[in-house]
Image (spheres, helix red, strand yellow):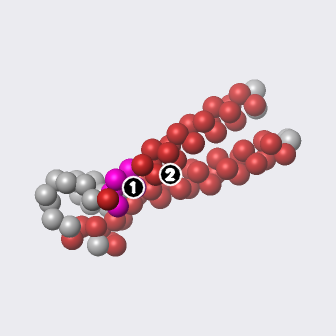
Amino acid sequence: MGVFNIVLVVLHVLVSILLILFILLKSGKGGGLSDMFGGGAVGGGGGSTIAEKNLDRLTVLTAVVFAVTTVVLALRLV
């Protein structure tokens, strides 16, 4: 296994862990881990806060990086 593959696998694992954490921090209808940090105390006005928008952006960016590393790993290891 080359150095590039090792770096790619490490990056993929780190991005996977980040993606799991970001998804768990998102507040859904029933709340989530974000309720533990005061996210559930916000009123149900339906509007998104700046923190929620930033978390959405981070989640999407992390998901894109995850998808790219998955495809590159699949093509490199074949």
Quadrant in which residue 30 is drawn: bottom left
Q: Residue 36 carries which label?
A: none
Position of 55 compared to 69: left or right? Answer: left
Q: Which mark is residue 54?
A: 1
**Image position of 70 (left or right of 1):** left
Image coordinates for residue 48, horizontal then vertical, percent: 25, 55
Q: Name the residue under label 2.
A: 19
Q: Please report the residue visible at 39 percent of the width from the left and 60 percent of the height from the top.
A: 25
User: Residue 50: x, y in percent?
Assistant: 32, 59
Amino acid tagged 2: Leu
Look at the picture and state if 12 lies above or below 73.
Answer: below
Tell me the quarter of the image containing the N terminus: top right
The three-letter amino acid code for the residue at tag 1 is Asn
Provide the secondary structure element on which disc 2 rests. helix
Instruction: Provide residue 24's location: percent of width, then percent of height.
Output: 40, 58
Q: What element carries label 1?
A: helix
* CB-based contact (under 8 Å), mark 1 and mark 2: no
Q: Which residue is rendered at x = 45% and y = 44% of the image?
A: 60
Q: Residue 35, image x and y in percent?
A: 29, 68
Quarter of the figure that contains the C terminus: top right
Closest to the observer: 30 or 51?
51
Left or right: 78 as drawn, with respect to 27: right
Task: Determine the main secondary structure of the stretch shown in magenta.
Answer: helix
- The residue shown at (15%, 65%) is 43
Which of the 4 quarters of the picture holds residue 54? Answer: bottom left
Around disc 1, counting alpha carbons within 10 Å, would you say few (fewer than 14), some (14 to 19), or many (20 or more)? Answer: few
**Spatial CA span between label 1 and label 2:** 14 Å
Q: Give the range drawn in magenta.
A: 51-56
Quarter-of-image position of residue 67: top right
Name which of mark 1 and mark 2 comes first in the sequence. Answer: 2
**Residue 28 part of the magenta segment:** no
